C-alpha cells in the first residue's frame, strides 16, 4: 500500500506540473454546458455533445468548489485519472499478482495520453477511467464466484456496480457501446472457468442460478441508469429513446470525420504515412509514447498464458471496434478517429504491458529486461508529456492577453472565431460584461458602434481571416486597425500576430452626383432588345442607365423629374459613378417601371414607384449585401405604358 501511495503522489505531481485546463476541441462546449447546469440555466441539452451528461454534470460540483477557472473545469478529470491508477492496481492484483498491479499503476501514472486528459474536461479520459472500474467489478464478481464453495451466486453487488458503471459510461460518451460488445463476448467465453462449479451443482441448475443470473443483474443495473436517462429525454422531447435516435441520425450524416484506417497505426507505432516504416512523429505529437510498441510484444507473450487471455481480448475488441467499427447501427460508417479516442483502450493496454514486464520468464531475464523497459517508458513519457503540454498551452496562448485587452477596451460587440468566443466567455466567467460576442462570419455587414474584430492565426484552430478578407492588403475601408499584439510562441514556434480592428460607421451622405455621358439612347435600346428580349420591347421607354465601378454598401437613388440624387446609407461610399437620364418622370401613374440589372452581385430593386405621395419620384435601392470588397454594378431602368 505504501508503494501505491508513492506512485499516486508522483502521478499527482506530474498531472499538476502538466495541468492543461481549457483548450480547443470540444471542451469549450462542455465547459459552457457545465456552467448552465451549475446555474440551473439548462439541465438537458439536445445536441450531440449535450448527450454526454456524465462528462459535464459532475463538473458543476467542481465549479462550485473551485470556481470557473482551469482548476474548476479540469479537476473532475484529475480525480478520475488518480482513481484509475488505484483501480488498475487492484485489477492487476486481482487477475495476476500484486507486483503486476503496482507495475500497471506505475505505467499508467506516466502514460502521456492519460496525463494530457487528466486535466481537460473531455469524455475520453473519463471514459477510460469509468470503463476500467466497469470491467474490474465484472472480473471481481467472477473471480469471487469461481473461488467460492457456495452453490449460489456470490458477490452480487459486484455485478450491480458493473451494470451501473456501464450505464454511466454511456452517459459519458456513446462510444462506450463497445463495452457492451466485449461484455457479451466475455460472458459466453468465460463459461469455461465455471465448468468445475457447474459440474458440482449440475449443469442446468448452475447455468440459471450462476451464469444466467449474473447476466440478468448486470443488464438490469445498466437498464436502471438507461431508464432514468430515457425518462429525462422523454419529459423534454416525448421520445424515450431520443438520445439514441438523434445520435444515430447525427452519425449517419457525413460530417467530414476522419476515417483514415492508417491513422491509429501510424501514431501508435510512429510510422511514416507513406512507406509505413518507423519514423518518429515528433515530441509534441507522441500521444501514446512507445507503449503500444511494447504492447504488441505483450500480446504475443500473453498467448502462452491463459490468465492473460481476457485482458488481451479486452484490448483487441476495443481496438478492433475503434479501427473498423461503425458510427451508425443503420448503415456502415467507419468510426471517427482522433488520437484521444484511443483512450478507451488504455486500461487493457496498460495491463498487457504490465503483465509482460512483471511476469517475463525466465526470472533472470525479467530482472534485467523489465527495469529497462519501465525506465525507458518513464523517461520517454516525461519528455513527451512536457512537449505535449507545451503544445496545448501554445494553442491558447494569446487568449488571456486578448481578454485583458477587451477588459480595458470595454467594447459592446466583439467579432471573433467560434473557439475564441468560447474561450473568451470562459475567461469572462460567462458574465455579460456589457459586451456581445458574435461569430466573425457575420462581420461582413457589421455597422454597430463600439464594435471590434479579432483577427489572427491561432494554432490548432485557424482563424477565418482569409474568409473575411482574402487579401490582407485590402481590409475593408471602414475597418480601422486599433492595435496589434505579438505573442511569442512556445517550442521555438513563430510568434502570434493578433490584430484588433475597430468598425467605423460611414456617415450618411446625400448630395447630387455628377452626370457623365455613357451611351446614346438608340444604342442602348438596340442592345437591350437583343440581350433581354423577354423584358424589353420596341415600345419600352428607356429611363435611366447607371453604372458604378466600385460599390460596396447600400445606396438609394432618387429620380425626380430628370434629376438623379444619391443617398448613401452605410458601409463604403461608391466610387466612379456614371449615369444618364433619358426621360423625365411624368407627374402621373401611367407607366410601369422595371430595373434590368446587367452586372453586380447584390440586389437592385425599386423601392417606390412614382406617386403623389412621394411627389412622383422613382426610388431605387442598390444593396451589395454581405460580400467583401467592391464590385462593379451596371443597370438600366425602363418604363412601359400600363395596359388598362
Image (spheres, rainbow, N blue to C red):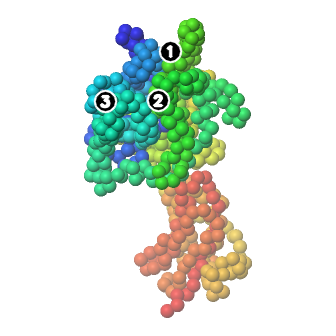
Q: Which residue matches tag 3?
A: 158
Q: Foreground: 280 or 105?
A: 105
Q: Quarter-wise, where is residue 576 in the image?
A: bottom right
The residue at 52%/43% (across/down) is 325
Q: Which residue matches tag 2?
A: 310
Residue 271, placed above or below residue 377: below
Q: How many marks?
A: 3
Q: Foreground: 186 or 248?
A: 186
Q: Do the residues labelled 2 and 3 touch (CB within 8 Å)?
A: no
Local crowd size for mark 3, using a 10 Å CA cut-off: few (<14), some (14–19), many (≥20): many
Residue 621 in the image, given as x and y percentages of width and height: 52, 67
The residue at 54%/72% (across/down) is 559
Q: Are marks 1 and 2 in contact (CB under 8 Å)?
A: no
- Regarding residue 343, the answer to whether it shows in the image is no
Under circle 2, the secondary element is: helix
Residue 521 in the image, given as x and y percentages of width and height: 69, 79
Residue 87, placed above or below residue 372: below
Q: Which of marks 3 and 1 is nearer the N terminus?
A: 3
Q: Is residue 167 left or right of residue 385?
A: left
Amino acid at each position: 500500500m505504501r508503494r501505491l501511495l508513492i506512485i499516486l503522489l508522483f502521478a499527482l505531481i506530474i498531472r499538476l506540473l502538466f495541468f492543461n485546463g481549457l483548450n480547443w476541441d470540444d471542451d469549450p462546449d462542455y465547459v459552457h454546458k457545465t456552467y448552465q447546469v451549475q446555474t440551473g440555466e439548462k439541465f438537458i441539452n439536445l445536441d450531440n455533445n449535450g448527450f454526454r451528461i456524465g462528462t459535464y454534470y459532475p463538473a458543476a460540483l467542481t465549479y462550485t468548489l473551485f470556481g470557473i477557472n482551469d482548476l474548476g473545469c479540469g479537476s473532475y478529470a484529475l480525480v478520475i485519472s488518480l482513481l484509475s491508477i488505484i483501480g488498475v492496481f487492484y485489477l492487476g492484483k486481482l487477475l495476476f499478482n500484486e507486483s503486476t498491479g503496482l507495475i500497471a499503476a506505475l505505467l499508467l501514472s506516466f502514460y502521456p495520453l492519460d496525463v494530457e486528459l487528466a486535466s481537460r474536461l473531455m469524455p475520453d479520459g473519463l471514459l477510460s477511467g469509468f470503463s476500467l472500474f466497469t470491467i474490474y467489478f465484472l472480473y471481481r464478481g467472477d473471480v469471487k464466484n469461481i473461488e467460492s464453495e457456495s452453490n449460489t451466486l456470490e458477490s452480487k453487488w459486484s455485478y450491480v456496480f458493473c451494470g451501473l458503471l456501464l450505464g454511466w459510461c454511456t452517459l459519458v460518451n456513446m462510444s462506450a457501446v463497445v463495452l457492451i460488445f466485449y461484455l457479451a463476448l466475455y460472458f459466453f467465453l468465460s463459461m469455461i472457468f465455471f465448468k468445475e462449479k457447474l459440474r458440482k451443482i449440475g449443469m442446468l441448475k448452475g447455468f440459471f442460478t450462476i451464469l444466467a443470473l449474473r447476466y440478468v443483474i448486470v443488464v438490469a443495473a445498466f437498464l436502471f441508469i438507461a431508464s432514468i436517462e430515457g425518462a429525462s429525454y422523454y419529459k423534454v422531447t416525448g421520445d424515450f429513446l431520443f438520445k439514441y435516435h438523434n445520435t444515430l441520425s447525427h452519425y449517419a450524416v457525413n460530417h467530414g470525420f476522419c476515417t483514415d484506417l492508417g491513422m491509429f497505426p501510424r501514431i501508435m507505432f510512429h510510422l511514416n504515412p507513406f512507406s509505413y516504416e518507423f519514423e518518429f512523429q515528433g515530441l509534441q505529437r507522441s500521444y501514446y509514447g512507445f507503449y503500444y510498441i511494447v504492447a504488441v510484444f505483450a500480446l504475443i507473450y500473453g498467448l502462452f498464458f491463459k490468465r492473460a487471455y481476457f485482458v488481451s481480448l479486452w484490448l483487441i475488441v476495443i481496438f478492433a471496434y475503434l479501427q473498423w467499427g461503425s458510427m451508425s447501427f443503420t448503415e456502415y460508417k467507419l468510426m471517427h478517429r482522433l488520437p484521444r479516442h484511443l483512450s478507451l483502450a488504455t486500461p487493457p493496454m496498460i495491463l498487457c504491458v504490465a503483465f509482460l514486464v512483471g511476469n517475463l520468464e525466465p526470472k533472470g531475464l525479467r530482472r534485467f529486461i523489465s527495469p529497462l523497459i519501465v525506465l525507458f517508458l518513464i523517461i520517454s513519457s516525461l519528455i513527451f508529456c512536457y512537449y505535449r503540454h507545451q503544445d496545448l498551452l501554445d494553442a491558447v496562448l494569446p487568449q488571456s492577453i486578448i481578454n485583458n485587452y477587451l477588459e480595458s477596451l470595454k467594447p459592446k460587440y466583439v467579432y471573433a472565431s467560434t473557439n475564441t468566443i468560447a474561450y473568451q466567455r470562459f475567461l469572462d466567467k460567462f458574465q455579460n460584461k456589457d459586451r456581445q460576442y458574435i461569430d466573425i462570419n457575420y462581420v461582413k455587414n457589421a455597422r454597430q458602434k463600439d464594435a471590434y474584430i479579432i483577427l489572427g492565426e491561432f494554432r490548432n484552430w485557424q482563424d477565418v481571416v482569409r474568409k473575411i478578407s482574402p487579401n490582407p492588403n485590402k481590409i475593408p475601408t471602414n475597418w480601422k486597425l486599433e492595435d496589434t499584439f505579438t505573442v511569442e510562441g512556445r517550442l521555438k514556434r513563430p510568434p502570434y500576430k493578433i490584430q484588433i480592428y475597430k468598425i467605423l460607421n460611414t456617415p450618411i451622405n446625400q448630395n447630387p452626383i455628377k452626370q457623365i455621358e455613357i451611351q446614346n439612347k438608340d444604342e442602348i435600346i438596340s442592345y437591350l432588345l437583343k440581350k433581354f428580349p423577354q423584358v424589353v420591347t420596341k415600345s419600352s421607354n428607356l429611363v435611366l442607365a447607371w453604372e458604378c465601378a466600385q460599390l460596396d454598401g447600400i445606396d438609394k437613388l432618387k429620380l425626380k423629374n430628370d434629376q438623379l440624387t444619391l443617398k448613401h446609407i452605410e458601409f463604403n461610399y461608391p466610387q466612379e459613378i456614371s449615369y444618364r437620364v433619358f426621360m423625365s418622370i411624368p407627374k402621373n401613374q401611367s407607366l410601369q417601371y422595371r430595373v434590368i440589372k446587367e452586372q453586380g452581385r447584390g440586389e437592385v430593386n425599386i423601392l417606390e414607384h412614382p406617386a403623389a405621395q412621394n411627389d412622383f419620384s422613382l426610388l431605387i435601392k442598390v444593396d451589395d449585401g454581405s460580400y467583401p470588397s467592391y464590385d462593379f454594378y451596371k443597370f438600366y431602368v425602363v418604363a412601359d405604358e400600363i395596359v388598362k
